[in-house]
Amino acid sequence: MQINYICFYIMFQHETKQLQTYTHSYRNLMYLLEDQFWLEDFGECKGMGKCGTCLIEVIKAPNLLMDLQRNKSNTLKKAAVHHQSIRLSCQLFIDHTLQDAILKIYEPY
Ligand code: FES
């Protein structure tokens, strides 16, 4: 079985951290971020796409589709987020689409 490694960057609290992982190492990006950054009140609905507390901003993502097909538009509206670059991290898989991406953990305050 071939392991596909993935490298991408997460910006959080004025720092940028390089993350290296492999395809489907976590159920979705929300679980990876929660595990790596120990975020409070992040991903409250555990990936159901209902709470809007797992937001990330896509700074650069050469392989990530920018449509919102897996993002729940109602949840984004509820979180008062209307910008196309804001996504629910629980709706993003750990796969090749994250390769070389730069993402920022969204802090609305
Ligand atoms: S974890 Fe609740 S919307 Fe993503």
Image (cartoon, rainbow, N blue to C red):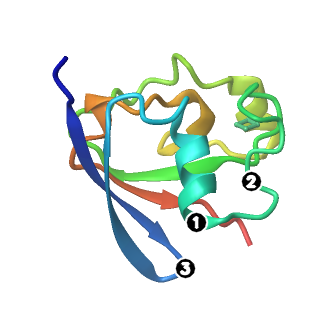
Name the kind of residue labelled 2 in the image: Phe
Q: Which residue is mark 3?
A: 13
User: Crowdedness of circle 2 by 10 Å Cα count: few (<14), some, many (20+)?
Assistant: some
Give the mark nearer the N terminus: 1 vs 2. Answer: 1
Residue drawn where x is 70% and y is 65% of the image: 108
Task: Specify the amino acid type for callout 3.
Answer: Gln
Report if the beta carbon of the residue with label 1 is closer than 8 angstroms to ligand 1: no
Q: Which residue is mark 1?
A: 37
Q: Which residue is mark 2?
A: 42
**Kind of element beneath mark 3:** loop
Q: Disc 2, ligand 1: is the CB inside 8 Å? A: yes
Specify the farthest residue to the front. Answer: 1
N-terminal of the two: label 1 or label 3? 3
In the rendered image, the residue lying farthest to the bottom is: 14
Q: Is residue 106 above or below residue 91?
A: below
Visible residue check, residue 87:
no
In the rendered view, tell whether residue 15 sits above or below residue 87. Answer: below
* Placement of the N terminus among the 4 image quadrants: top left
Where in the image, quadrant-wise, is ligand 1 located?
Answer: top right
Q: CA distance from mark 2 to mark 3?
A: 15 Å
In the image, residue 75 sits, relative to residue 69, either above or below, namely: below
Residue that extends furthest to the left in the rendered view of this protein: 2
Q: Nearer the viewer, residue 75 or 33?
A: 33
> Where does the image place residue 101, in percent across and percent down from the top left?
29, 49
The amino acid beneath tag 1 is: Phe
**Foreground disc of the pair 1, 2:** 1
Residue contact between numbered discs 1 and 2, judged by CB atoms under 8 Å = yes
